[in-house]
Amino acid sequence: MDTKPVVKLSDFPWDIPQSKPDRPLSGSMERLYENYATPRPEDNELFTSFKYTKLKGFDYRDADGTLTRRDPSKIIFENGKYYVWYTKRDTVCPPRGAANCTDEIPSTDWDLAEVWYATSEDGFTWEEQGCAVPRPAKPQVGWRSVATPDILKWKGKFYLYYQAFEEASGTKGDNCPVAVSYSDSPDGPWTRAEGVTVENGEPGTWDQYSIHGPAPLVYNGKIYLYYKAAFGDRPDYLVGLGLVTADDPLGPFEKHPLNPIMNSGHETTFFPFREGIAALAIRNGNEANTIQYSPDGVNFDIAAVSTLFPTAAKPYAPDAFLDTGDGRGFEWGLCHFTNGGSPGKKYGFLARFDCSLSRDEENPQMK
Ligand code: AAL
């Protein structure tokens, strides 16, 4: 007969104490009270899971890979509707890799692409409106492909930043700088600013090869433009996320002396939160799959860990350009899914994600 006492669930103090116990704690329990705003994830306003919905309204040619829509911009609300810009590739065949690409055959899913845009009344059903930024004639910056756009509204004007490829992606890694076009209306017409807006780094610097995923916000009275670069000449090595700032949307942009400001991530998802800036760190690096917070827009730390993150996620954050110093976060955005697979089949489609990264005013822990 087993004489061990029966242990009942009620014997355990299951609810984690909100205040740090005054007794020695393990390293992990120390972190629980030192690193996070609240010990209970359900109280942590930067903890969230994600829900996905395929969008309606776009035509999909999933089967043959000749059409892709991917890498959406942040969403803005103007003229009574939502706007989004994205990479659109519509080519004679699916991507065939750098060794087999031509002026008509794409190397990658974002090669030979343009920046298109769509509008929506509800964020679920979208209507494609047309091309915002076409590829310019060779040898202008971006002649090979313009992709991965993001939007800025500054003093009533609109600015689209995008990767501007001057050679087929994959030829030498994913090399490209960033260029910008501007307009008085989100419906265009868009005027291309001459040349490169955010330069690659000097030879030997961490961002020498690529300036990817430009993500502008307005913060501290300036334009804070975050971006991704790949250490080494291939984008699947460790990436770092960097910051450039400017007083004018057309530059000059100054690289932050502490770059890279994040050691993990991939596509760039940044948004104003309380007095600072928050970000999603997805896919690459030791801190992948985390939601991070910085009180100053530069020094980020892990605020929460989650799973099934959206790829290439861009929020609808109404205060992205308001510089309130009291960011409210967001609850939905757009992202993309790609069929992955062999280069020949690779293509993307846009989707909506919903989350709870907005301020939880009811939660006394987060005042
Ligand atoms: C995206 C982004 C950049 C890369 C490619 C297109 O997800 O990381 O834009 O260059 O993939």
Image (cartoon, rainbow, N blue to C red):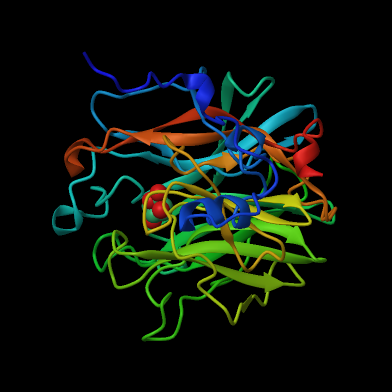
- Return the residue nearer the eye: 3 or 212: 3
Q: Residue 350 location in percent, x, y? A: 46, 31
Residue drawn at the location 23% of the way across and 38% of the way down:
94
Which quadrant of the figure contains the N terminus?
Answer: top left
In the image, what residue occupies the spot 72% across and 49% down? 273
Q: Is residue 76 visible?
A: yes
Residue 136 visible in image: no
Most distant residue in the top direction? 1
Dividing the picture into quarters, in which one does residue 169 lie? bottom left
Residue 139 appears left or right of 129: left
Residue at image coords 75%, 38% = 359
Residue 176 image point, x, y percent? 41, 66
Observer-nearest of 180 and 358 = 358
Looking at the image, is 157 positioned above or below residue 333? below
Residue 268 place in picture, x, y as percent: 52, 53
Question: Residue 98 in the image: x percent, y percent?
Answer: 20, 57
The relative height of residue 13 versus residue 167 in the rendered view (above or below) is: above
Work out whether residue 214 or residue 193 is closer to the camera in this orientation and state it. Answer: 214
When the figure is inspected, residue 244 is found, relative to residue 46, above or below; the finding is below
Q: Is residue 211 above or below residue 114?
A: below
Q: Is residue 167 left or right of residue 215?
A: left
**Count of numbered circles on the image:** 0
Which residue is farthest left?
99
Q: Is residue 102 left or right of residue 138?
A: left
Front-most of residues 111 and 296:
296
Q: Quadrant of the C terminus?
A: top right
User: Where on the picture, by quarter, is residue 8?
Assistant: top left
